[in-house]
């Protein structure tokens, strides 16, 4: 079976080989085992899944759930293990065996060379694809498995959809209502944690000496967290705060009411200014900001944060027609 890949360095994280169940070329292999090259005989199952496009590439897909979003969902659906082969600095870890410690791109070239030398390489050809890069530094982004905090969004999205259906919220121009409904109908759980050094800290504290998953404390301050921990574990207990910060859009979603004295819903500012009448903003953040403000507003106050949303267009650079005019792209006209 021939597999085409643009990232041979992830083969150490392969946990299966998938083909389409209706692809007659490979039907006889389904249910058997395949040896992962350069792994000293490690075996993975050959499986059938309708996600695989028999017309794409060779019709055979290597499943590396630790380093690919689609592979991850296939692995979760089928109960496959998840292997991470990469460190946070872009080098391969111990799962990669003899290639451990190599930079990912150095390992890519070395792997290809070794595959050629062992007669396991078929051919190498140009292939064009979109490669995600860091906004600031331009580095190639590598999908990695890590533990994060998530918010279950379905119950929140349902209320936000009903707000538009019942006329409590009007989106203008009207064509954006369809986009709003599509996003909220197909919403996924929201990862709200970020590994940054600036932002609102995750309000969670852990007990020193215990695994994070076993016990944690949610509190408004370190003093409150310590008091809760001492009540359960005694005066000698030590705690430390989760190092992550909240997604900036999570903080922004609270803005309509968090600036008005919330959680005191009886404050003069809250009673006078909430809810607002109109929100005006760019259409590009309809989901990132607007929809989330609606969901948070309904959840924590029982009311939509505004009655009307007016979405305006975006100014674009005449030379970079696919980009917005922003300071980070240095595309602002001199008069701005």
Image: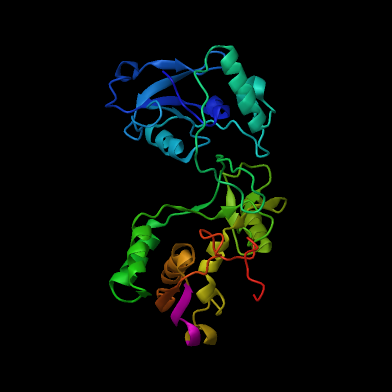
Residue at image location 51% in from the left, 58% down from the top: 322
- Is 122 or 153 nearer to us in this picture? 122
Colour setup of the view: rainbow
Residue at image location 68% in from the left, 39% down from the top: 89
Check the image and name the residue furthest to the right.
Answer: 236
Residue at image location 57% in from the left, 16% down from the top: 116
Residue 198 is left or right of residue 75, and the answer is right
- Is 266 or 95 nearer to us in this picture? 95
Q: Which quarter of the image is occupied by the C terminus? A: bottom right
Residue 275, placed above or below residue 151: below
Residue at image location 36% in from the left, 74% down from the top: 173
Viewer can see residue 283? yes
Magenta span: chief secondary structure: strand
Q: Quadrant of residue 269?
A: bottom right
Q: Position of residue 318 (x, y in %)?
A: 54, 64
Q: Position of residue 121 (x, y in %)?
A: 52, 18
Residue 292, placed above or below residue 92: below
Residue 102, placed above or below residue 289: above
- Is 323 or 210 nearer to us in this picture? 323
Residue 239 is left or right of residue 78, and the answer is right
- Is 201 or 327 nearer to us in this picture? 327
Range shown magenta: 272-281
């Amino acid at each position: 079976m021939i597999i085409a890949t643009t990232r041979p360095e992830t083969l150490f994280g392969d946990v299966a080989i998938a083909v389409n169940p209706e692809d007659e070329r490979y039907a006889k292999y389904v249910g058997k085992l395949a040896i992962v090259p350069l792994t000293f005989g490690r075996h993975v199952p050959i499986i059938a899944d309708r996600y695989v496009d028999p017309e794409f590439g060779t019709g055979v897909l290597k499943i590396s759930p630790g380093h690919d979003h689609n592979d991850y969902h296939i692995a979760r659906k089928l109960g496959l293990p998840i292997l991470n082969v990469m460190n946070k600095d872009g080098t391969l870890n111990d799962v990669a065996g003899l290639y451990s410690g190599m930079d990912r791109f150095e390992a890519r070239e070395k792997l290809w060379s070794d595959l050629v030398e062992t007669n396991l390489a078929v051919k190498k050809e140009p292939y064009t694809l979109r490669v995600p890069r860091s906004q600031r530094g331009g580095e190639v982004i590598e999908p990695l498995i890590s533990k994060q905090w998530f918010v279950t969004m379905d119950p929140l999205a349902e209320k936000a959809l009903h707000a538009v259906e019942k006329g409590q919220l009007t989106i203008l121009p009207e064509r954006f209502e369809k986009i709003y409904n599509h996003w909220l109908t197909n919403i996924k759980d929201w990862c709200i944690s970020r590994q940054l050094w600036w932002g609102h800290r995750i309000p969670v504290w852990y007990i020193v000496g215990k695994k994070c998953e076993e016990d944690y404390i949610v509190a408004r301050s370190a003093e409150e967290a310590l008091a809760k921990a001492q009540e359960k574990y005694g005066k000698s207990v030590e705690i430390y705060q989760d190092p992550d910060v909240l997604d900036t859009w999570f903080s922004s979603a609270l803005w309509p009411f968090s600036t008005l004295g919330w959680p005191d819903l009886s404050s003069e500012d809250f009673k006078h200014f909430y809810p607002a009448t109109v929100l005006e903003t760019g259409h590009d953040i309809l989901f990132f900001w607007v929809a989330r403000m609606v969901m948070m507003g309904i959840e924590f106050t029982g009311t939509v944060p505004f009655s009307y949303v007016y979405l305006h267009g975006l100014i674009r650079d005449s030379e970079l027609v696919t980009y917005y005019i922003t300071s980070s792209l240095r595309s602002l006209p001199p008069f701005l």
